[in-house]
Amino acid sequence: MSDEIPLTEQVRHEVRDGIARITLNRPEAANAITPDQRNHLIDLLAEASEDLSVRAVVLGATGKHFCTGADLRASRPGRAQPEGAPERPGGHVSRMIRTGAQRLVTAVLDCEKPVIASVNGTAAGIGAHLVYACDLVVAAESAKFIEVFVRRGIIPDGGGAWLLPRLIGIQKTKELMFFGDAVSAADAASLGLVNKVVPDAELAAATDEWAARLAAAPTRALALTKQLVNRSLDTDRATSLLEEAAGQELTMHTVDANEGVAAFVERRDPTYRGW
């Protein structure tokens, strides 16, 4: 079914008012993500980093689900193998994870524009990790989050064991990953996985409000702030302070920094351009 629908319709993309909106659009498959969709998402996030007209990214979905994980029914033609070679030779699975789920999560973390997850429903497996990699998360009250891997007898992938402890601590991470229970939006917010929970009917408006604020902010300053914060838990104090100083040096030479200082002196609201 998905092969019959253009990829640009399976993953919708538009840029308007400084905001790139990337929307998963296979509600009939609960927005389970295929390899082609995943690669397209990665390309769109890289494009958002480079596009000066983009100053914020919103990652959302249509239907009742955000993303229920990898589409295990989706298949792609593999490389021709020598006669007698095993179907899954040594290194095949780890390579598939590195170039697939891990690359997708990394694309969100490394995107130079702030990324908001607008979670309309279930986010499970790599779908949940896609959310956790985003900079801000707005969730509908009906949304839920599931570390579904244990239910399949496998370990979490897509960087989950790296992301979750940094967000909620080791003990709570083990609880979610060991049991695979669904976590409500309200509970996810209390744990620190979600920034804001709103009634389902208000999800789009709440997301748009934050996206508009980010699109009007000093874009390069946000990019460097994101980089510093994402590295903070893996960097010693001395290195972090050096990177902070270097980042401030870079930021102070931007047009937006000059505008911010001028607006302060002139007692007016700044108008940032994104560079």
Image (cartoon, helix red, strand yellow):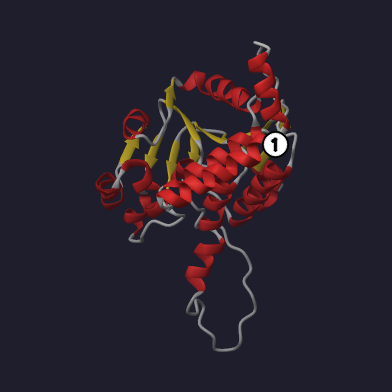
Relative placement, left or right, of 256 versus 196 is: right
Q: Quadrant of residue 116?
A: top right
Residue at 56%, 19% in the rendered image: 205
Q: Is residue 52 visible?
A: yes
**Rendered position, 91 above or below 258:** below
Using a 10 Å C-alpha cutoff, classify the residue at mark 1 as few (fewer than 14 neighbours), some (14 to 19) or many (20 or more).
few
In the image, 220 versus 99, the foreground residue is: 220
Helix, strand or loop at label 1? It is: loop
Residue 96 screen position, x and y as percent: 53, 66
Q: Which residue is mark 1?
A: 253
Relative placement, left or right, of 14 versus 202 is: right
Residue 45 screen position, x and y as percent: 64, 45
Residue at 57%, 20% in the rendered image: 209
Q: Is residue 21 visible?
A: no
Residue at 50%, 63% in the rendered image: 97
Query: Which residue is farthest top?
Result: 267
Residue 127 screen position, x and y as percent: 48, 45
Q: Quadrant of residue 112?
A: top right
Image quarter (top left, top right, bottom left or bottom right) of the C terminus: top right
In the image, 190 versus 126, the foreground residue is: 190
Inspect the image, locate mark 1, and give the three-letter code of the amino acid beneath it.
His
Q: Quadrant of residue 151?
A: bottom left
Residue 110 screen position, x and y as percent: 58, 48
**Rendered position, 139 above or below 49:** above
